[in-house]
């Protein structure tokens, strides 16, 4: 289950499903512990911390420990923007850190509305060098789908061990007619299963 631990983020991604903002708020720790308790009772085995930008929480490592106490494997997604050595240390309790990486060069900008590819690549490299298991989250859009092979190859080269492929969601800032211009075209959606087979091979 995805657990939004904050609505605070300064990235300003065009398609943010949560509409996170720089003045967003962290979810109170007590509320999150109640959520973890409910997840444990429901048999949830993985909790993906999202937001917002979860690395803005100084207690992210403590939250991971609390999740593990309840049999929940904690993972986290970050934009990688502003990642520091101190933040990397706080992420060591997580089973895996996934960096949002939607494409090489201007492909990233086509998805998020700003050029953050270099920051994402730097974060992947930093996490790998620190011995933190790192993967990537790739949001699929019609403008970048054809370059997916190159995106995955680059992520692997930088040290990513996994790629999660995500749909562009019609929620938050993407809840507009712009969604129709960004989601996969029908022929791309049909080609998706074959593309997955090729990438796995």
Image (cartoon, helix red, strand yellow):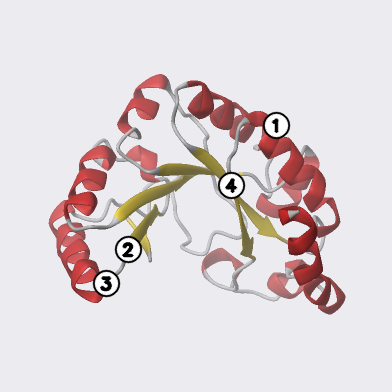
Q: What element carries label 2?
A: loop
What residue appears at the point 12 percent right and 56 percent down from the top-left corner?
A: 30
**Marks 2/3: CA distance?**
6 Å
> Do the CB atoms of the residues marked 2 and 3 lie less than 8 Å apart?
yes
What residue appears at the point 70 percent right and 54 percent down from the top-left corner?
A: 111
* Percent coordinates x, y for residue 69 in the rendering: 16, 52
Q: Mark 1 points at which residue?
A: 157
Q: Mark 2 points at which residue?
A: 45
**Marks 3/4: CA distance?**
24 Å
What residue appears at the point 58 percent right and 47 percent down from the top-left corner?
A: 162
Total labels drawn: 4
Local packing at callout 4 (Cα closer than 10 Å; few below 14, some 14-19, many 20+) is some
**Marks 1/3: CA distance?**
35 Å
Local packing at callout 3 (Cα closer than 10 Å; few below 14, some 14-19, many 20+) is few
> Do the CB atoms of the residues marked 1 and 2 lie less than 8 Å apart?
no
Tag on residue 178?
A: none
Judge by depth and name the residue closer to the eye, 194 or 111.
194
* Percent coordinates x, y for residue 148 in the rendering: 78, 52
Q: Mark 3 points at which residue?
A: 43
* Percent coordinates x, y for residue 132 in the rendering: 44, 31
Residue 24 in view of the camera: no
Q: Name the residue under label 4.
A: 162
Between discs 1 and 2, the one toward the N terminus: 2
């Amino acid at each position: 289950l995805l657990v939004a631990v904050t609505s605070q983020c300064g990235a300003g991604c065009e398609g943010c499903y949560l509409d996170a903002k720089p003045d967003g708020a962290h979810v109170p720790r007590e509320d999150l512990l109640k959520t973890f308790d409910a997840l444990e009772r429901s048999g949830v085995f993985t909790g993906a911390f999202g937001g917002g930008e979860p690395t803005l929480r100084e207690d992210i490592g403590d939250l991971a420990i609390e999740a593990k106490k309840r049999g929940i494997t904690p993972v986290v997604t970050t934009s990688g923007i502003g990642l520091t050595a101190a933040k990397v240390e706080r992420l060591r309790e997580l089973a895996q850190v996934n960096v949002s990486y939607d494409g090489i060069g201007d492909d990233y900008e086509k998805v998020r509305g700003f050029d953050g590819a270099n920051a994402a690549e730097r974060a992947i490299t930093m996490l790998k060098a620190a011995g933190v298991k790192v993967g990537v989250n790739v949001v699929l859009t019609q403008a970048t789908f054809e370059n997916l092979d190159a995106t995955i190859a680059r992520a692997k080269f930088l040290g990513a061990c996994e790629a999660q492929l995500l749909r562009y969601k019609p929620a938050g800032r993407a809840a507009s007619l712009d969604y129709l211009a960004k989601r996969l075209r029908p022929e791309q959606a049909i080609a998706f299963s074959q593309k997955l087979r090729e990438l796995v091979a």
